[in-house]
Amino acid sequence: MSKTIELTDDNFEQEISRTEVPILVDYWAEWCGPCKMVAPILEEVAQDLDGKLLIGKVDVDQNKDSALKQKVMSIPTLVLFKNGEPVDQRIGALTKTQLEDFLSQHI
């Protein structure tokens, strides 16, 4: 079962604030090559960290307000939220090892 949720301008605040575990939000777009490279890695990490982390995905073309609120200027951008607040971020495609290293600092 996937631990990935689709976030939109309409549900973003509610979903981010209601989760009891950290949520890593992937700001992406369908046309973005590096975003497509990161997607399967995020799915793997979601499975590996089941119960400890959720992955949220924001399509920046469809949800501009959510992207603007976090000042997303490049994609993919990954923002880690804890208790409804952003705590850290990475910009650009990461390898699985890089992503695990980033997350290990916070989880």
Image (tube, grey):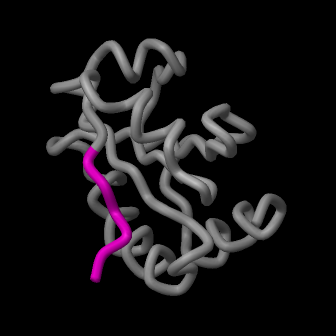
Q: Which residues are magenta?
A: 1-6
What is the quadrant of the C terminus in the image?
bottom right
Q: Position of residue 69 (x, y in %)?
A: 48, 14
Quadrant of the image occupied by residue 30 = top left
Image position of 97 with respect to 80: above or below: below
Query: As displayed, is residue 41 above or below residue 69?
Result: below
Residue found at x 83% / y 62%: 105
Question: Which image quadrant for residue 97?
Answer: bottom right
Q: Is residue 3 left or right of residue 104?
A: left
Question: Residue 25, percent across and down?
Answer: 47, 46
Q: In the picture shown, does residue 85 fall above or below 94?
A: above
Residue 75 in the figure: left or right of residue 94: left
Front in this rendered view, residue 29 or 54: 54
Residue at figure coordinates x 79%, y 59% from the top left: 106
Q: In the image as oriented, which residue stretches furthest toward the right? A: 105
Residue 72 or 11: which is nearer the viewer? 11
Please give the count of numbered marks on the rendered protein: 0
Q: Residue 1: horizontal and vertical position, in percent?
A: 28, 83
Say which of 28 and 8 sits in front.
8
Residue 84 % position (x, y): 61, 35
Residue at 33% from the left image edge and 47% from the top image edge: 57
Q: Is residue 17 magenta?
A: no
